[in-house]
Image (spheres, rainbow, N blue to C red):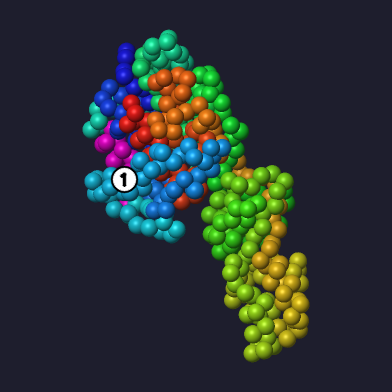
């Protein structure tokens, strides 16, 4: 059997590419259904893009690589596509756009776009072996137990990263990249909760607080969530992409709050108030209780000297966290790193050395922040390859 273009992976990037790669396209996926990560994303409402998406929101050894695709297929193009399909949406926070309805709407939209373009979809299909005879690719497929040899002029690798193996994530994209002479950078779980050897925050499980977390020179202001395993919440997921084992994360638990000044004023007005009760105006009471021993939060406001209030202010703006690891690919939303962009065209996503071989989506060494950026990269890179084909 022969097709013009064989796309491996019916996820966000593969389906977007198929909708633009012209007729005679076959998309294969080993899963039972397409777009499984779209379905579970954003708590079932899919955070499909971000109003503020720009190259600054992506991590890559080459920060310029993502610019071309992101500027030619933008968040506004995807929003237009939703409008054409009558899918309504809302902004939740920080430019993050979610469906008003459920995420399967996005999957259905992409399937309709693929069908309109004439692309076929084979589910429960594995790629056993891929080779190139100098003109065509030869793919040995197992379609639900049936062996099929498929030749194709173009192969688009859109099988994603390693995160959530339970959902069918495999390293196939990296294997194909290496087979055809492309480098793969170190990969690690990202947008992932962080763990501690003996979780000092276990008693705080369920407590959330707005915080500014910093790793090196990067910081994020978002919610920090204490869990029975360690730390999670958007602030931790964001900073996990920048943190490395052995390093510290600095938590400012009161971003932009001039605590010492405020407490000095309160000491004048209500010196008999307990310090802990006063702090509970700014932080969850359970967190104040937890920190009270380490930070000697005791006595009335009147008992606190200016120096003591300044010390407390500094401590709450600079809590040192030392995670020992992360929850790993089991729960990571994305894979940091991947197929090196060095051997690829940023215009088309095509290999510079193997004409007709394309890599798109999360498999590449292009990783977005939390907040709809990773789907935007899937749409933009998928569209760029589709246009080129
Ligand atoms: P994706 O993983 O979507 O698709 C790859 C496809 O290839 C899958 O269908 C898989 O079955 C198939 N495949 C893999 N190996 C194969 C093999 N060997 N043979 C055949 N098929 C194979 N991002 C965002 O922007 N907003 C959000 O709200 C979320 N939320 C979110 C929640 C959770 C729980 C996770 C795990 C991830 C997110 N993400 C996200 C990240 C986002 O889902 C991810 O970046 C994109 O789905 C990547 O799109 P791709 O098409 O590159 O891979």
Q: In the figure, is residue 261 to the left or right of 389?
A: right
Query: Can you tell me whether the CB of the residue at mark 1 lies under 8 Å from the nearest atom of ligand 1?
Result: no
Residue 342 covered by magenta stretch: no
Q: Residue at x 69, y 72 (%)?
A: 313
Where residue 375 appears, as percent x and y from the top left, is 42, 43
Residue 23 appears in the figure: yes
Percent of width and height locating residue 312: 71, 72
Residue 272, compared with residue 228, is above or below; it is below
Q: Quadrant of residue 376?
A: top left
In this rendering, position of residue 68 left or right of residue 118: right
On screen, residue 310 versus residue 125, left or right, reads right
The residue drawn where x is 44% and y is 29% is 345
Most prominent secondary structure in the magenta stretch? helix
Task: Residue at 70% x, 52% y: name it.
Answer: 248
Q: Which residue is mark 1?
A: 77
Residue 292 seen in this snapshot = no
Count numbered badges in the picture: 1
Which x, y percent locates residue 365?
Answer: 52, 35
Above-or-below relation of 21 to 129:
below
- Magenta span of residues: 101-114
Residue 204 screen position, x and y as percent: 64, 61
Residue 313 vertical placement versus 21 (above, below): below
Q: Residue at x 44, y 33 (%)?
A: 346
* 177 sits to left or right of 96: right
Between 273 and 117, the residue placed more toward the observer is 117
Q: Quadrant of residue 314?
A: bottom right
The quadrant of the image that shows the C terminus is top left
354 vs 29: above or below:
above
Q: In which quadrant of the rendered view does residue 279 lie?
A: bottom right
Q: Residue farthest to the bottom?
A: 269
Specify whether residue 106 is painted magenta.
Answer: yes
């Amino acid at each position: 059997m022969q097709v013009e273009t064989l796309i491996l992976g019916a996820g966000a990037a593969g389906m977007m590419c198929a909708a633009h790669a012209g007729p005679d396209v076959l998309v294969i996926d080993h899963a039972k259904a397409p777009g499984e990560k779209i379905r579970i994303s954003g708590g079932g409402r899919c955070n499909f893009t971000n109003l503020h998406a720009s190259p600054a929101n992506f991590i890559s050894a080459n920060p310029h690589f993502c610019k071309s695709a992101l500027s030619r297929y933008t968040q506004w193009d995807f929003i237009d596509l939703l409008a054409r399909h009558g899918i309504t949406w809302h902004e939740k926070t920080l430019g993050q756009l979610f469906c008003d309805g459920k995420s399967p709407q996005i999957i259905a939209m992409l399937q309709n776009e693929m069908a309109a373009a004439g692309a076929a979809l084979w589910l429960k299909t594995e790629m056993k072996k891929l080779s190139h005879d100098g003109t065509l690719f030869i793919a040995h497929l197992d379609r639900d137990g049936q062996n099929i040899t498929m030749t194709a002029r173009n192969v688009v690798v859109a099988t994603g990263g390693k995160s959530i193996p339970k959902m069918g994530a495999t390293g196939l994209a990296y294997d194909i990249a290496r087979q055809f002479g492309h480098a793969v950078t170190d990969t690690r779980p990202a947008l992932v909760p962080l763990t501690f050897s003996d979780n000092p925050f276990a008693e705080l499980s369920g407590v959330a607080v707005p915080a500014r977390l910093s790793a090196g020179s990067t910081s994020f202001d978002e919610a920090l969530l204490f869990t029975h395993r360690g730390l999670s919440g958007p602030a931790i997921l964001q900073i996990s992409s920048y943190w490395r084992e052995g390093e510290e994360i600095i938590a400012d638990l009161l971003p932009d709050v001039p605590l010492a000044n405020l407490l000095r004023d309160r000491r004048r007005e209500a010196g008999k108030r307990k310090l802990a009760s006063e702090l509970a105006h700014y932080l969850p009471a359970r967190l104040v209780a937890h920190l009270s021993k380490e930070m000697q939060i005791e006595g009335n406001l009147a008992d606190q000297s200016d120096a003591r209030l300044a010390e407390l202010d500094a401590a709450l703006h600079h809590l040192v966290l030392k995670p020992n690891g992360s929850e790993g690919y089991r729960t990571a939303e994305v894979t940091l790193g991947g197929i090196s962009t060095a051997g690829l065209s940023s215009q088309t996503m095509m290999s510079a050395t193997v004409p007709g071989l394309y890599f798109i989506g999360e498999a590449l060494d292009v990783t977005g922040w939390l907040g709809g950026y990773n789907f935007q990269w899937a749409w933009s890179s998928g569209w760029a390859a589709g246009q080129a084909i």
